[in-house]
Structures are given as C-alpha cells and as structure tokens.
Image: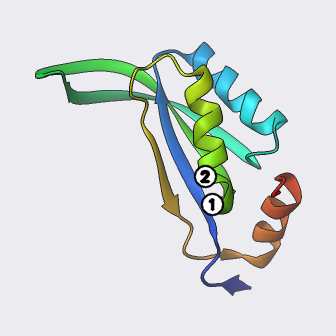
C-alpha cells in the first residue's frame, strides 16, 4: 500500500573517491542517520571557481527520514573532503508503508 506524503527522502552526496564514499556511508548508518546508502560511480561535469571540471566521482544515495536532514548534513560535512560538498535532499513522494516503517525503525529521531 502506498501512502503520501512520506516525510522520507533520498539525500544525494558526491565524493572524490570510493573510500570516502564508503566511510561516509558507514558513518551515517552507524549514527542511525540513515536506513540505507547506495554507492555508484559517476562522471561529473561542473563549474568551480570559474573553471569547468570533468572528473570521476562517487555518488551516495542516502535513504532517511528528512527530519534528520540538518543533523545528517552536519555529520557529512565533518568528514567530507570537499570545501563545498553536494548534499541535497529529494523527497520520496510515494513509498510502501512497510518500506517507510522499515526506514523509521533504522533511524533515530531525537
């Protein structure tokens, strides 16, 4: 059964290396700030300090309760190597109620 709105989301983060992506994923799972994290290699093209950059990066898709976004983003910034890391949240508009319940059981909202 689907329920709307969910209050849950996917937080997307890019990193320079696979090792950094794994470290961030492990940290946010251990801190109960995320229920799951998927990691994928990506090719990024972006403008930084007036120049166009093209490079291989790693992308994290962090599934969480969006009530934790501020705490999650602060934790990521503590350990991220980028001066200005991408930390953006996309809402999950629809999800199975059992999946939502599972996310809620995995995270700790204070």
The answer to whether 85 is drawn above or below residue 94 in the figure is above
| Residue at screen point 34% across, 27% down | 43
The answer to whether 14 is drawn above or below residue 109 in the figure is above
Q: Position of residue 37 (x, y in %)?
A: 67, 41
Seen as rendered, the residue at the extreme left is: 50
Q: Residues within 10 Å of mark 2 (few under 14, many from 20)?
A: many
Question: In this rendering, would 67 be left or right of 30?
Answer: left
Per the model, the C-alpha gap separating discs 2 and 1 is 5 Å
Q: Position of residue 89 (x, y in %)?
A: 50, 54
| Residue at screen point 59% across, 76% down | 94
Q: Are marks 2 and 1 in contact (CB under 8 Å)?
A: yes
Q: Nearer the viewer, residue 32 or 56?
A: 32
Which quadrant holds the C terminus?
Answer: bottom right
Q: Tag count in the figure? A: 2
Q: Which mark is residue 69?
A: 2
On the image, which quarter does residue 26 sit in? top right
Seen as rendered, the residue at the extreme right is: 105
Q: Which mark is residue 58?
A: none
Q: Which mark is residue 66?
A: 1
């Amino acid at each position: 059964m689907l329920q709307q709105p969910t209050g849950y989301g996917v937080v997307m983060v890019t990193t320079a290396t696979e090792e950094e992506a794994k470290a961030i994923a492990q940290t946010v799972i251990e801190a109960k700030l995320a229920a799951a994290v998927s990691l994928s290699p990506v090719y990024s093209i972006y403008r930084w300090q007036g120049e166009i950059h093209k490079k291989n990066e790693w992308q994290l898709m962090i599934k969480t309760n969006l009530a934790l976004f501020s705490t999650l983003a602060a934790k990521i910034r503590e350990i991220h190597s980028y001066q200005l890391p991408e930390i953006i949240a996309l809402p999950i508009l629809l999800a199975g109620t059992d999946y939502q319940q599972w996310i809620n059981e995995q995270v700790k909202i204070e």
